[in-house]
Image (cartoon, rainbow, N blue to C red):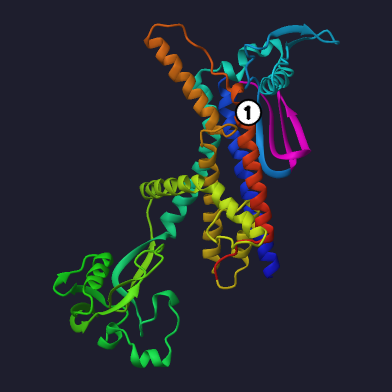
């Protein structure tokens, strides 16, 4: 049963990602066709073709490796100043556009070859349908459509989960006691069970004073309590002083005289050393926060900041995975994973014995939403060959044209994105290398679901 559930989890995750890729590419294709562009291919996956069908001028198909997809839009690269485009007649008597190749310099040759390969498939009647001839704002919409689809998928899933089950990652903390700690456990030892000696010699003030689970804290040393953060601050500042606590228990106000003790605590999750502060020995009750569209938008705003930080540190994180692969370091359990790692986590969630069916469904949905959001944000990075690179090129073309219009100068025309091809190759190679490292890492030193 566990093997079947694990396989089901992997299958659900895989199908969801393949569907996301397909929808991403539709986000490019639909506006491209709407604006009159010519789309010759729509494929999901890479490598050998498994299946394809020609519908009108577009070939739709699936390839063997479902790790991405692409849409072929005619005329992405314009002919450059170093080249000439001219009409020739092929052996069958058909007119075709040919682009003369340049042979001066390595990078010039790379650009020239790419242009020539692009123009080998363009016919004279395609002249008015070339992508580079579209208005700059149409180019931007076409390229933005793909990442937008991924972000919308994430938004829909997040909204559904947050509005029903709630967001466990953003808990609402009450002023009601959720746990009374029996003894003072050292900060670096977590929430382990108290020993008999600790119960006798180091009970917490709250345990000794008779504070109970379910008590709602009304005041602390005369100060009305409106939030747990306020309560925590007052306790920490109290040091080893006395404490007059009023709680509401079964509808009645109960005054409790106790004290706080000083003990080292980690004040923030990323603190390296604990700080000595006042300690009472209670934890609050909390529950997942629920919210609708506006709440989801706010949460995705926070996620955007987190993803931006993750993208900046991605090369460093991947380097850490590489070191873990060869055994000279440990893999960060909160670090990046590939689609292989995502599939493994999905399988572990689905087959976990101690997770309810509802929580499994929610976890899988959140995993799928998280991957979609990351993919969408990654593609908006303004570097070619990512969609964000072409969006930036289109926006720059619009800025140049607008500035020229304000100065009553001739329109400078399109931005030659082909000149960015050397950068494209560098970025593409970097992404491929990082992807391969993550996949190997997910096979050799995988990240596992926390118990």
What residue is at 40 percent from the left and 14 percent from the top?
403
Q: Is residue 41 magenta?
A: yes
Looking at the image, the residue that sits furthest to the right is: 91
What residue is at 60 percent from the left and 32 percent from the top?
385
Q: Is residue 213 above or below residue 156?
A: below
Percent coordinates x, y for residue 242 in the rendering: 18, 81
Residue extent of the magenta highlight: 37-64
Q: Nearer the viewer, residue 345 or 250?
A: 345
Percent coordinates x, y for residue 139 in the rendering: 53, 23
Q: Nearer the viewer, residue 244 or 272?
A: 272
Percent coordinates x, y for residue 366 in the rendering: 52, 55
Q: Quadrant of residue 250?
A: bottom left
Q: Nearer the viewer, residue 351 or 75?
A: 75
> Where is the C terminus found, in terms of image quarters?
bottom right
| Residue density around tag 1, few if under 14, some if 14–19, many if 20 or more, within 10 Å | some
Looking at the image, the residue that sits furthest to the left is: 222
In the rendered structure, the answer to whether residue 375 lies left or right of residue 73 reads left
Q: Is residue 336 above or below residue 198?
A: above
Q: Quadrant of residue 204?
A: bottom left
Q: Is residue 201 above or below residue 237?
A: below
Q: Nearer the viewer, residue 333 or 33?
A: 333
In the rendered structure, the answer to whether residue 361 lies left or right of residue 190 reads right
For the stretch drawn in magenta, the main secondary structure is strand
Q: Is residue 388 magenta?
A: no
Callout 1: SS: helix
> Where is the N terminus found, in terms of image quarters?
bottom right
What residue is at 37 percent from the left and 11 percent from the top?
406
Q: Is residue 382 above or below residue 102?
A: below
In the rendered structure, the answer to whether residue 397 lies left or right of residue 22 reads left
Residue with the mark numbered 1: 422
């Amino acid at each position: 049963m566990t093997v079947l559930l694990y396989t089901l989890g992997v299958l659900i995750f895989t199908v969801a990602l393949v569907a996301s890729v397909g929808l991403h590419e539709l986000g490019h294709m639909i506006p491209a066709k709407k604006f009159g562009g010519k789309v010759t291919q729509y494929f999901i996956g890479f490598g050998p073709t498994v299946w394809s069908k020609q519908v009108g001028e577009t070939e739709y198909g699936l390839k063997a490796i479902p790790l991405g997809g692409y849409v072929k839009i005619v005329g992405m690269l314009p002919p450059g100043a170093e080249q000439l485009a001219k009409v020739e007649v092929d052996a069958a008597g058909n007119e075709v556009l040919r682009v003369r190749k340049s042979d001066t310099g390595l990078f010039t040759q790379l650009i020239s070859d790419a242009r020539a390969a692009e123009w080998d498939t363009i016919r004279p009647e395609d002249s008015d349908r070339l992508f580079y001839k579209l208005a700059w704002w149409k180019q931007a919409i076409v390229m933005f459509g793909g990442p937008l689809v991924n972000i919308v998928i994430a938004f829909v899933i997040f909204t559904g989960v947050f509005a029903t089950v709630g967001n466990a990652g953003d808990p609402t903390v009450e002023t009601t006691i959720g746990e009374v700690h029996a003894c003072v456990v050292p900060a670096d030892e977590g929430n382990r069970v108290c020993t008999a000696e600790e119960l006798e010699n180091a009970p917490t003030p709250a345990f000794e004073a008779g504070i109970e689970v379910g008590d709602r804290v009304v005041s602390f040393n005369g100060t009305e309590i409106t939030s747990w953060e306020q309560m925590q601050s007052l306790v920490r500042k109290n040091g080893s002083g006395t404490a007059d606590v009023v709680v509401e228990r079964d509808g009645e106000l109960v005054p409790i005289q106790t004290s706080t003790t000083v003990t080292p605590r980690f004040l923030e999750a990323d603190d390296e050393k604990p700080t000595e502060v006042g300690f009472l020995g209670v934890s609050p009750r909390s529950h997942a926060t629920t919210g609708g569209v506006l709440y989801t938008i706010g949460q995705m705003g926070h996620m955007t900041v987190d993803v931006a930080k993750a993208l900046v540190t991605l090369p460093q994180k991947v380097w850490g995975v590489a070191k873990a692969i060869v055994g000279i370091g440990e893999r960060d359990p909160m670090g990046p994973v590939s689609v292989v790692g995502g599939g493994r986590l999905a399988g572990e969630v689905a087959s976990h014995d101690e997770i309810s069916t509802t929580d499994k469904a929610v976890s899988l949905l959140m995993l799928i939403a998280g991957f979609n959001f990351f993919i969408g944000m990654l593609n908006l990075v303004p570097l070619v060959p990512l969609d964000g690179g072409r969006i930036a090129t289109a926006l720059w073309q619009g800025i140049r044209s607008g500035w020229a219009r304000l100065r009553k100068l001739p329109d400078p025309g399109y931005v030659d994105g082909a000149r960015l091809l050397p950068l494209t190759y560098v970025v593409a190679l970097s992404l491929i290398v990082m992807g391969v490292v993550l996949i190997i890492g997910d096979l050799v030193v995988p990240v596992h679901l926390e118990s």
